[in-house]
């Protein structure tokens, strides 16, 4: 019973050190399977300042878990679009947009990642991502959006989740002479946000393939 209590206590307080600590959430590089016949249009991906600087913070006791969404998404979205388009360039402005068939400007409409009671529990992450699509005349700009969640919806999802990088922290209780490696929450949270973003980007790709 004492060992069980120790394990649960470690799960609750892992990564929550004394004082004010910022713990970056570790997110794996996005990997989306390429389609066989990619779209031939040339794409300019515009990452504006609002998205590039986007960070999300979740506070729990003395620790602030930081999601650097801007840094992560500028690469994840580029790799996602490259899985369905032959050519994808990236820029911070639209000055060169005339040289491309499609200009895509993404934004995050909402993001939620509440810290769970125990580190072994999933972080119930949800994200809604929007693309503004601008094509050459006579097309008018339009928006598409998709919401992704942490939920593992298929055997493929489970395989992807299990392949994601994990970390652990060794803890020891001198009173019980018992130690164990407890999952590092910064990695566990990263796995759940990966799945949420993965689901949203896959849905956005499906919409692009249907519309362009």
Image (cartoon, rainbow, N blue to C red):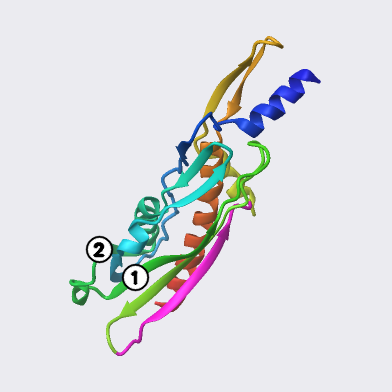
The spot of residue 16 in percent (x, y) is: 56, 33
Q: Earlier in the sequence, mark 2 or mark 1?
A: 2
Which residue ends up furthest to the bottom in the rendered image?
Answer: 138
Check the image and report above or below for 148 versus 187.
below
Q: Quadrant of residue 91?
A: bottom left
Q: Name the residue under label 2.
A: 92
The spot of residue 192 in percent (x, y) is: 56, 47
Relative to 16, 69 lies left or right: left
Which residue ends up furthest to the front in the rendered image?
Answer: 19
Residue occupying the point 45% across, 43% down: 28
Question: Over which residues does the magenta segment extend?
Answer: 138-151
Residue occupying the point 38% across, 63% down: 84
Residue occupying the point 55% across, 64% down: 147
The residue tagged with tag 1: helix, strand or loop? Answer: strand
Question: Between 8 and 36, which is closer to the camera in this rendering?
Answer: 8
Check the image and report above or below for 194 versus 80.
above
Relative to 44, 129 lies left or right: right
Relative to 63, 143 lies left or right: left
Residue 33 circle label: none
Q: Residues within 10 Å of mark 2 (few under 14, many from 20)?
A: few
Total marks in image: 2
| In magenta stretch: residue 86 | no
Tell me the quarter of the image containing the C terminus. bottom left
Residue 183 visible, this orientation: yes
The spot of residue 40 in percent (x, y) is: 30, 70
């Amino acid at each position: 019973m004492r060992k069980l209590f120790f394990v649960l206590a470690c799960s609750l307080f892992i990564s929550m050190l004394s004082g004010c600590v910022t713990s970056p959430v570790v997110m794996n590089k996005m990997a989306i399977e390429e389609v066989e016949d990619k779209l031939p249009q040339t794409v300019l991906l515009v990452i504006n300042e609002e998205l590039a600087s986007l960070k999300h913070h979740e506070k729990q006791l003395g620790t602030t878990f930081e999601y650097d969404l801007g840094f992560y998404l500028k690469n994840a979205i580029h790799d996602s679009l490259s899985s369905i388009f032959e050519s994808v360039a990236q820029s911070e402005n639209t000055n060169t947009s005339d040289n491309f068939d499609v200009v895509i400007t993404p934004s995050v409409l909402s993001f939620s990642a509440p810290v769970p009671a125990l580190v072994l529990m999933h972080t119930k992450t949800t994200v809604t991502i929007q693309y503004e699509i601008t094509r050459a005349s006579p097309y008018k700009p339009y928006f598409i959006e998709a919401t992704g969640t942490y939920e593992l919806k298929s055997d493929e999802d489970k395989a992807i989740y299990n392949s994601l990088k994990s970390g652990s922290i060794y803890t020891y209780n001198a009173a019980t002479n018992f130690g164990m490696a407890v999952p590092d929450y910064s990695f566990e949270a990263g796995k759940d946000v990966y799945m949420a973003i993965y689901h949203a980007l896959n849905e956005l790709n499906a919409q692009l393939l249907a519309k362009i």
